[in-house]
Structure formats: structure tokens, C-alpha cells
Amino acid sequence: MGTFLPSITAGKGATEDDLERFLEKITHSNGCWLWKSAKPGKYGTFSWQHRQWPAHRWIWMVANNRMLNRGLVIDHLCRESRCVNPKHLEAVSYSRNARRATIDARRKQFLEIVKGAPIPKRPKERLVRADLSAPLYQR
Ligand SMILES: [Zn+2]
């Protein structure tokens, strides 16, 4: 784990103890690292150097060895807000994140409609032959 300890802010690095403390707070589930104390749909928070950090942002910065630039947000590729697996986190612009959220919402809505809808029965094959001799308009 020695290589996984870059500094987050100038002169102040995350230590091995910090990382250990962090990793104690997660539980593994289908490749996701779920923050144990976070409620579904919420982010976990990690206290580090007298500050509360959103856990996913903290681990992203440690894993990527840089601060998160202004204007960027962390997108959960796995769509699990409690997840702090750095491999599931991507820094994207606000607008892209919003666009993804809209697409997600539409997909969810669509799936709910599809799930709730009765399965259409296949219509009986019924060919209606057009009567070509019939007048187009009834007089
Ligand atoms: Zn995940």
C-alpha cells in the first residue's frame, strides 16, 4: 500500500493510518466499496485533518494524487452514491453530471412504466384485404 499514499494538499499527505481508518468504514458489495454509515442515496463523510470530507471525494483525490479542480464533481459510474471505490469514481463537469443524471432519471422512469404496464398480447393475425372494387367514398 506504500505507493497509494500521495499528498492531498501541499505538504500534508494522507498517511497509511488515514487510509486504514478510511478502509475500516467500508463494506464490499458487488465490486462497490459501500460506506457503512451512509444512508442509501447519501454520501459518506470522512473526517480528516479537522475537516469533514465527502468520502468519495477524499478517496478520489488520494487515488488520483491531486485536488479536485473547481467545476468538477465526482460521478459514480456504478450509480451507487455510498460507493467509494476509486475505480467507480470519475471526475466530470457539472453539466455532464447533470446530463447523466437526466438520462438516468429518464431511464428509471421508462423502466417503471415498462414494469408496470401489462404485457401486450400478440394480436391475432388478421389480414384485412382491401376491397379494391369498393368505391373510395360512399355516396
Ligand atoms: Zn461502486
Image: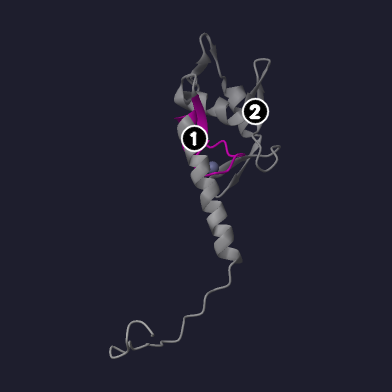
Q: Is disc 2 placed on a helix, strand or loop?
A: helix
Q: Going by the picture, which residue comes out furthest to the top?
A: 11
Residue 5 sits above or below residue 76 on the image:
above
| Residue plotted at (47% across, 31% down) | 95
Q: Which residue is mark 2?
A: 21
Q: Quadrant of the C terminus?
A: bottom left
- Label 2: how many residues lie within 10 Å, few (<14), some (14-19) or many (20+)? some
The quarter of the image that holds ligand 1 is top right
Q: How many marks?
A: 2
Q: Is residue 73 magenta?
A: yes
Q: Position of residue 108 (x, y in %)?
A: 55, 52
Disc 1, disc 2: CB below 8 Å?
no
Residue 45 sits above or below residue 48 on the image:
below
Identify the amino acid type marked 1. Answer: Asn
Magenta range is 72-94
- Label 1: how many residues lie within 10 Å, few (<14), some (14-19) or many (20+)? some
Give residue 97's mark.
1
